[in-house]
Amino acid sequence: MITGELRSKIDKVWEQFWTGGLSNPITVIEQMTYLLFIRRLDDIHTQREQKASFLKKEIDQPIFQPKQNELRWSFFKNADPDVMYRLFTKENGVFDFLKNMGSTDSAFSSYMKGATFMIPTPRLLAQVVDMLSEINMEDRDTKGDVYEYLLSKIASAGQNGQFRTPRHIIKMMVEMMKPGVEDIVCDPSAGSGGFLVYTGEYVREHHGSELMKPATQKHFQEKLFMGMEFDPTMIRIGAMNLMLHGIEQPNLKMVDALSESNQDFVEKATVVLANPPFKGSLDREAIDPKLLNIVDSKKTELLFLGLILKGLKLGGRAAVIVPDGVLFGNSKAHQIIRKEIIDGQKLEAVISMPSGVFKPYAGVSTGILVFTKTASGGTDNVWFYDMTADGFSLDDKRNPIQDNDIPDILQRWNNLKAERSRSRTDKSFMVPVEDIRDNNYDLSINRYKEVVYEHKEYEKPEVIIAQIEQLDQERHQLLQDLKKMLTEDFTTDKSGK
């Protein structure tokens, strides 16, 4: 948890960015990301210097050369704002150094091509540097929380096209998948890296002792996390998010996941966690023909399901957020992808989420599909859950509330045997695959949920009419009494008695 004081300083710097003309929250976070990176490089270089001094040897793999000391965080953080700004903007200065160091052993540095320094004034640069200097970069939780707080600004701004999946929904999906130290977890639309970050936190919490083994730690750092993102700004933000959460070498690929250039993602992942973009439509020529063989569509939400099926290993599992239309759409492509997941693979669960989950971005209704790649079918009974509350108000403010179905979802998911006896009037229940096939592979929960109507008896019409007439008589009598009372009062006033 970050302190209220630090949170206040971040808010103040954020306001300065807006005052300075940088109103896009993605741009603001990106600029802060560059500064976090240069500070991290200086910390690594300092550690290597100290080790070399202790061993009385030359520094191993130096990041900065002796003539580049002025580019180090420890040097310029105490400089006058104008001097600091010149060091960043001059030729071969700090920012040029960041852009041209793609050969270093850093996941982040390889994504710096095309980066632009946009902090407008020396004063603002000095303020941001001062604020970041107060963050304990030795503490993974603190620096991770600070970055997550910065990312939360995307949601509060609500002005850009980047969807940020609510962190409590991500956490729920990760806990449902239970990733382990030997898994390869992929998000094919990685964005800011939320699914991968929470996967790392889950693995540390549940498999900490196993991570002490060198081979397991190597897999954790280099192979466990896989992500794809075509937006160069977002992949930089995602890479920094992972690094600040202690994942130094994530396998992030800057590629349009649905294009033919993404040829490597074939039976690679053992777990997929994703919230693919909704309601997009691509030119047919831009789509990988192999995906069109799975689902012939131009809709991104359907193509990503095809991509996930292609990228999962046999036995691999997926939890994917989809718009409601995927669950019940009548087009041929909608029916084909549902049929493939149900008949060709093993569909395990459909969680219906309320429409306010993604506010303030949009009020679209969504669901979560959970399935396993078998390539031979296996769907028998599908678990449906009707989530009506996620712990936050379902309006644009998204304030915390007490109603929250997520703990119940996790508890029931971990005890599916007990779900078989539940009736379809409950929040969750099982549906045999035969029923789903009979309903044209419709996965809308309303197709299967039964509503119990309370039986009420009403008086006969003639009795109700008599009651109305009685009330009308009483009303008329009261009105007459009121008139009489007012007349008597008026007469008394006139007589003076």
Image (cartoon, grey):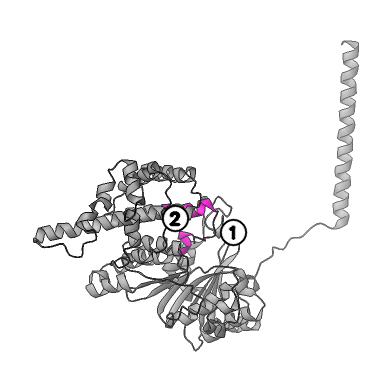
Name the residue tied to disc 2: 151
Residue 211: percent from left, percent from top: 26, 70
Name the secondary structure under disc 1. loop
Q: Of 423 and 147, which appears nearest the observer? A: 147
Calculate the distance from the C-alpha at mark 1 to the C-alpha at mark 2. 18 Å
Q: Residue furthest left?
A: 56
Name the residue tied to disc 1: 362
**In the figure, is residue 286 to the left or right of 37?**
right
- Vertically, is 446 above or below 19? below
Residue 79: percent from left, percent from top: 28, 43
Q: Are the residues at dot 1 and dot 2 in contact (C-beta closer than 8 Å)?
A: no
**In the figure, is residue 52 to the left or right of 344?**
left
**In the figure, is residue 465 to the left or right of 287?**
right
What residue is rendered at 86% in x and 57% in y? 461
Q: Using the image, tell me which numbered label, if any, was put on residue 21.
A: none
Q: Specify start and end residues of the magenta stretch as a single range.
A: 149-170
